[in-house]
Image: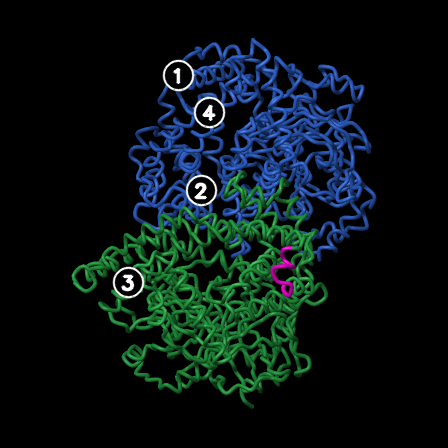
Chain colours: A green, B blue
Amino acid sequence: MRRIFSSALAAILLAGTAMNSNLPADEGMWLFSNPPLKQLKAKYQFEPNEAWLEHLQRSAVRFNSGGSGSFVSPDGLVMTNHHVGADALQKMSDADHDYIATGFYARNGADEVPCVDLELNVLQSIEDVTEKVNAAVKPGLPPAESQLARRAIMNTIEQESTEKTGLRSDVITLYQGGQYHLYRFKKYTDVRLVFAPEKDIAFFGGDPDNFEFPRYDLDICFFRVYEDGKPAKVEHYLKWSEKGAADQELVFVAGHPGRTSRLNTVKHLEFMRDRVFPTSLNVIRRREVSLKNYADKSLENSRQAQDELFGYQNSRKARLGGLAGLQDPVLMDAKRAAESELKAAVAADPKLKASANVWSDIEQTLLIWDGLYNENYLIETGQAFNSDLFHKARTLVRMADESAKPNDQRLREYRESNLDSIKQELFSEAPIYPALETAKLADSLGMMMEMLGANHPVVTASLNGKSPRERAAELVNGSKLGDVAVRKHLSEGGQKAIAESTDPMILLAKQVDAAAREVRKSYEDQVEEPLRQAYAKIADARFATLGTDTYPDATFTLRLAFGEVKGFEENGKQIPPWTVMGDTFAHAEAHGNVDPFKLPESWLTQRGKIKADTPFNFVSTADIIGGNSGSPVVNRAGEVVGIIFDGNIQSLVLDFAYSDVQARAVSVHSASIIESLRKLYDAGALADEIQGK
Amino acid sequence: MRRIFSSALAAILLAGTAMNSNLPADEGMWLFSNPPLKQLKAKYQFEPNEAWLEHLQRSAVRFNSGGSGSFVSPDGLVMTNHHVGADALQKMSDADHDYIATGFYARNGADEVPCVDLELNVLQSIEDVTEKVNAAVKPGLPPAESQLARRAIMNTIEQESTEKTGLRSDVITLYQGGQYHLYRFKKYTDVRLVFAPEKDIAFFGGDPDNFEFPRYDLDICFFRVYEDGKPAKVEHYLKWSEKGAADQELVFVAGHPGRTSRLNTVKHLEFMRDRVFPTSLNVIRRREVSLKNYADKSLENSRQAQDELFGYQNSRKARLGGLAGLQDPVLMDAKRAAESELKAAVAADPKLKASANVWSDIEQTLLIWDGLYNENYLIETGQAFNSDLFHKARTLVRMADESAKPNDQRLREYRESNLDSIKQELFSEAPIYPALETAKLADSLGMMMEMLGANHPVVTASLNGKSPRERAAELVNGSKLGDVAVRKHLSEGGQKAIAESTDPMILLAKQVDAAAREVRKSYEDQVEEPLRQAYAKIADARFATLGTDTYPDATFTLRLAFGEVKGFEENGKQIPPWTVMGDTFAHAEAHGNVDPFKLPESWLTQRGKIKADTPFNFVSTADIIGGNSGSPVVNRAGEVVGIIFDGNIQSLVLDFAYSDVQARAVSVHSASIIESLRKLYDAGALADEIQGK
């Protein structure tokens, strides 16, 4: 399982939010501001106090490249998954150094390698600003004006908060519009690599074993955050458990689940089944195939494409599992039954009667969305222009235009409080490979021609009388945006510099911008805002009838999940809750010891050194999803007993509904981390730091 | 490049047919009944006589699994490509014997391994039956009646011919309806494997090197046809050239190009660009990804899926190349210009005036096709039911119904003269793997739900209230059709046995048959027949204005192509016309010696034995396409100088237009075949047989 956002994948992924009325015991991705105290007390007789919760909250780290992590030493040491760190590892690698393949260990601080554009966030506070946001949006306004008013107040709240506190401040939309919370984060942008194992053991079993259990992966990676050029001193960090997770033990997960859609209406789920998932899967598969083809041409091509390729493979498997859920009548019938119940409750309550129409309002809105879908997907989210250079060009073009406007009138992502994060990515020194860019862009331009037709004005404008392949080569070879200095120069020059630029990518971004903004506006006014308003009513109805003792759909913000270490039954066989390190070798042999079941030299040559019965990976009933990768798993004492890195194949329907029958979160056991560092990687100093020795 | 038909791929591939008015010198896939005598004389001063042509025609062999070959000894020895033979190799393999991976050599006749269902055809005669067919279709009939009348006369002609001659007899539609020729074939169904190299050298470079040049592949395979349990004595077979192909030498290719669309109207090409190719590519990619996922789970899964997976990879690359051509304004503008010229000629000729409307007739017909497209593709061609068991069930159900009708009223494929070939496949002992069947069927049922919607009656009937995965497992696990005896019993029992069967696959095939037949009828009456009639008029106009000195689009029937051995320029670099065996090792090393660039033991350990400068693969300007794989390449003396196995990436637009600027056919050189057999495979006896020693 994977970090959820990468620049390439972000827009393929889905919007959405949903939830059951009767929470099974271990269900929930809970807000730290509304934790599952009743549930924990009732089932586990555990009553965490505020200090316990705050300590865990402040020890949790968000990887903005898409994933989770945690502080595990007072000196700013951050633990995450190898596959979450891979984005950073890929960007610091070149033809001579492949950190993903070889792994890395910095024996001392001077050897720690700076990441080129990684931003880490630590949640400091949560403030409910729902009333403030809603007060700014006068009732009865047409949706287009509501949308502008809402955007203005959100931009303003964030900017005021950033100015007041110096913290990154984001207004988060919860319950798809039911609530708005202001999240303040401490931000770290000087992040350095400390340790990574080889990919062959971090992602042992590769795509075939991804989302499977039993499993044998050392999917870990350590970074360190710096402030003023020195390791940051952090007040909150997680202590290491001496024993690690035990069978049937209660465990907690603090992390950043990406997106779930449990609160979606049935029609909305059907829209995802019929439109959203099939479209994204077709795109994911075509990119997977196209990238694989590029990668297979040479070893260097393979190195360049590996992280992105993994991302598509991972998304494909996750989406297929989600789609299988949506195509399963058992799940959909349960959703229908729950919806009927809520509708009946609304109809019976005179105070809620006004909300009786929202389900059909949503259905109507989805028809509008359907009509806009391809244009929005291709032109505004940029799927037609699958190129880092293009996305940098668009950022430059839009940042120039948006920065010239007052903050409250800007597109959300160009709000004043977010510009630093945008620039962190825009000015990244991450390498851009022209041949890879050309292959990706040619394929996506061709895809646009297929999906919009050869005569669509944006298609003809983008292709400029050339074939997709020829046009892609011309754009990539002609652009100078691969040079960070050129990007900085254009950024500093503002609208004038952009207007005068003859860079072909800048020209293309300018040329399609009017059409892109137009479809975005249609989407925001006619889809996003009506959905927000409708879901706000559903949320109110839900709170009124089912209580507020619940949790919103995942939004890639910090959540608390819990569950117990527990095996499961599959095809009539009981799967034990954990694997042991010694069995890794047999798993490799059963698959012929060939990639992706080829173990690294460090393991093959030092096999005798490790304690074979050390627990390696384990499963629990905690409610997690993509984005939780790298989340710390802690015990009642708040000590690290493991780290989330995957869910099993049965967990993929958790997008839509929780289940603990077979669905399981998969973690690396804390004991195997120490055992590997000490016995296989000669990294005793790092193990000492983690264990506080 | 690949044989074109496999049961799984056949229906993904495209119908269509097209051609330039001014034939460049080496253009053409010529009928043996209308050979390019003028062109050969004008450019090469070569005048083959009838005996020369007949000898080549009767030495050429069609592999009905999808590919070409030739007799190369008087004892029925047939040479083809490894990738053409792979279908047979796969079907004779099991968990303990993987003929594809290990290769094979029968030192004597007793060791030759029978293929389970391979049928080879050798063309004996060609008869023009256009007048007979057209006479049976009265002018002015509504299309539905024309369609029935045409089917009746074709079924009848074939049956009469088979009864009279004992030969397989097929009426071939040429020029998309402009001509009808009766082809009579001698049929061989006892075919045995003689020699195959290891896949690692037969398909060295795998998918990344497929459709590329320079190239280093020993893509050959030898079979022997038997009659009455003994090697067949054949009168016509090709002698081996002592020296093989030389630079700039004139060469000929006799083989079975699958499908081209050079004579399609521009609107028809646009329909292929916008509808046919994108649809088939999405399906090919999803199957490639899904099969790869299945294959990666274990070594045995990989063995089961390897041939089918290669087929999808090959098709995907071929289709992508074709689509790139259709998306290239240079190609499309040339097509537009040629069409305008023909239209002008038609408008200017009073005798042709009646044909002036056919272009708009075709455009209207394509709109109808568009509306039928998904239902026909999924339900009638069976893409929704991607399972060998289902296709056997459908064959049983339909054969029972059709066999009960008079021959002239049957669906084309169940005409009396074709039943033996149908049974050859239906009663094949080729293994069927339940887990693979389930994975494929689940994916295709899900695809149908995506493409037709969850509430389409065929979707709900097929799924029967289950999810696609659950339903697929239930169907595959419950069916007994994997047992050949069960299939034979049902076949012999006719309609009564089918009516009484409770096998879930039979039940499914019966349940969807009415809907499938209905959409087929709509397609045949409203699309196929109007297109035939329109293209017949275009063909007449073309013959009238441009002459009959031309060739029809490819139809997987025997054609003659010619050209010269000649390198090409790519990215400003001159690519020599051939590679040598010694450079194979460097190519492996440059790619890390890992799969698919891993050489077999036979090559690695005996490297010193081979003459390093032996020509290995070479390119020529001959006009070939998928289906030509395995075609013999002969010199003026009719001697084998090589065997076609691929086209370069620039050749993929040959679907639509010939070019000799960069497009090249790729062959294995005859010298490398002898060198390998004698030095690496200890197969001197086989080399002696080929060389007539």
Q: Which amino acid does label 1 sit on?
A: Pro
Q: Is residue B17 above or below residue B609?
A: above
Give the main secondary structure, helix, strand or loop, of the magenta stretch: helix
Name the front one of labels 2 and 4.
4
- Distance, label 2 to label 4, CA atoms, is 24 Å
* Magenta segment: A491-499
The residue wearing badge 3 is A537
Same chain, labels 4 and 3: no
Along the horizontal axis of the image, is A255 left or right of A303? left
Query: In the rendering, which numbered label is found on residue B142?
Result: 1
Q: Is mark 2 on a helix, strand or loop?
A: loop
Q: Which amino acid does label 3 sit on?
A: Lys
The residue wearing badge 2 is B386
Whether residue A163 is visible: yes
Q: What element carries label 3?
A: helix
Query: In the rendering, which numbered label is found on residue A317?
Result: none
Q: Which amino acid does label 4 sit on?
A: Glu
Whether residue A214 is visible: no
Kindly check if marks 1 and 3 are in contact, taking CB atoms under 8 A apart as contact: no
Residue at coordinates 66% horizontally, 83% vertically from top-left?
A: A108
- The quarter in which the C terminus of chain A is drawn is bottom right
Q: Depth check: A277 or A202 in front?
A: A277
The quarter holding residue B147 reads: top left
Residue at coordinates 67% horizontally, 26% vertically from top-left?
A: B254
- Distance, label 2 to label 1, CA atoms, is 35 Å
Question: x, y (%) of residue B123?
Answer: 61, 21
Q: Residue A494: within the magenta?
A: yes
Comes first in the chain, label 2 or label 1: 1
